[in-house]
Image: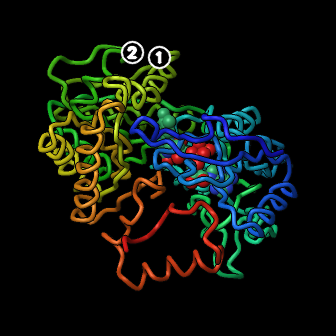
Amino acid sequence: MLVPAPGAYLVDETERRGLTGRADAVALPESTAEVATTIAWCYEHDVAIVPRGGGTGFAGGAVPLDGGVVLSLERLTRVRAFEPLLWRLHTDAGLRTADVRRIARESGLLFPPDPGAGEQSQIGGNIATNAGGPHAFKYGVTGAWVTGLEAVVPPGEVVTVGGPIRKDVAGYDLKSLLVGSEGTLGIITAAWLRLLPAPEAAFPVAAFYADTAAGCAALERVLGNGLNAATLEFLDAATLELAGRAFPGDIPSKAGFLVLAEADGSIDEAASLRAELADVLGEDSLGVISPEGSAVADLWRWRDGVSIAVGTARGGKVSEDIVVPLDRLGEAVEETVAIGRRHGLVACSWGHAGDGNLHSTFLVSPQDEEELARAELAAEELFALAARLGGSVSGEHGLGWVKRGQLDRQWSRRALELHNEIKRVFDPKGLLNPGKKVAYRT
Ligand SMILES: Cc1cc2nc3c(=O)[nH]c(=O)nc-3n(C[C@H](O)[C@H](O)[C@H](O)COP(=O)(O)OP(=O)(O)OC[C@H]3O[C@@H](n4cnc5c(N)ncnc54)[C@H](O)[C@@H]3O)c2cc1C
């Protein structure tokens, strides 16, 4: 079905930093065959195609920049096969992330990737961005749980790589090329996912510190003591101030950094790890809490809402997902604030500390073009910072539109050329999500 493009299909989360697109139509295919027909028609008529999942991306990847067809996967929601005894799920790409996790959980299984916004995002969008989330620290990012993909590639052909198999090294790893390709190489229409028996228990531990240095030292102590936490999240002082009001508990008055860890496993394992985490995180802390019962869900609900709480402070935010080696996290947190100060912006960061992955954020009013321009300049400095600290400009959201050309800060010329050549092989006309995931500035 092809319909004129309503406004909701022209934006993603980058609307909060003023990005809106323009499209000629929205395609709402109901099957892989209809996706293939749409791609074939667009390819024949030189029309750009912008794949769209739940539109929760932070990089502008699903925003149609300059006309063409938005191809929304929202009607491809069929579970093709769920085999709990074999720990696997074969599903259409449009199934929402929360539904994937719910289906697994109802049979005692776990699909570990847990990017926020699971009620809106789709598994296809998670795969296309190789999304992370808090539990990526122990369990890895989305791609680690994908054993096979069905995709439509230009000029409109269906390809299948992998399947319900746990190992496959026969060919070049096309599956992993499609994972994280942000809709620039093909349209993911279905995926085979592997699952795990769900841990019996998961107990959080929250520890407050006076400052970033003390918090980061605690994070390193967790690793140094060999504690296999399921999550290691952090919030800096400014984030605590912006989101702390809704924290389900008391925050010590001098708190300038929060570490949020989780211990999982059998009840005994999780309880014992929780005690060890509390002990190791407790050193030099202002206080440690270990919520139980309904307080556990309250804590994670609050953590899920941090991004929104920060975003509502001024109506908008420019937020980048840089990643640095863990031992440079403190520097990145402090530099984020310093960059903001230089540009006259309130800055804060939070995120997946164990993975060295920050959501470095500048608060803006989306209506204030001058402020937005300053925030974009600040973001450029963040990307330079990530490269300088030996990190990457994106740990989980991808390059999309907002980070186009930034890969040249961290890759050699030949590696960048290979990146471009791969795009040309898959999409010789450059019609799949044009302008996105562009490796270098020309
Ligand atoms: C409150 C909040 C918290 C978040 N927390 C996290 C987090 O912890 N970790 C994290 O990684 N992300 C997080 N995100 C970002 C976002 O949810 C993820 O990037 C998510 O995976 C995007 O999925 P989506 O279905 O919304 O994709 P979209 O935003 O619709 O698209 C993202 C990209 O994938 C492409 N795409 C989508 N579907 C397909 C498909 N089927 N085939 C090919 N290409 C496709 C699009 O073209 C676009 O380039 C968060 C977002 C919000 C709003």
| Residue corresponding to mark 2 | 248
> In the image, what residue type sits under mark 1?
Ala
At numbered mark 2, what does the secondary structure look like: helix, strand or loop?
loop
Image quarter (top left, top right, bottom left or bottom right) of the C terminus: bottom left
* Residue under the point 34% across and 28% down: 310
Tell which of 441 and 282 is nearer to you: 441
Tell which of 12 and 398 is nearer to you: 12
Q: First in sequence: mark 2 or mark 1?
A: 2
* Residue under the point 33% across and 52% down: 356
Residue 35 at x, y = what percent? 80, 56
* Residue under the point 18% across and 39% down: 212
| Residue corresponding to mark 1 | 295
Tell me the number on the disc at residue 130: none
Residue 414's quadrant in the figure?
bottom left
> In the image, what residue type sits under mark 2?
Pro
Tell which of 259 and 155 is nearer to you: 155
Image quarter (top left, top right, bottom left or bottom right) of the N terminus: top right
Tell me if label 2 and label 1 are in contact, CB under 8 Å. Answer: yes
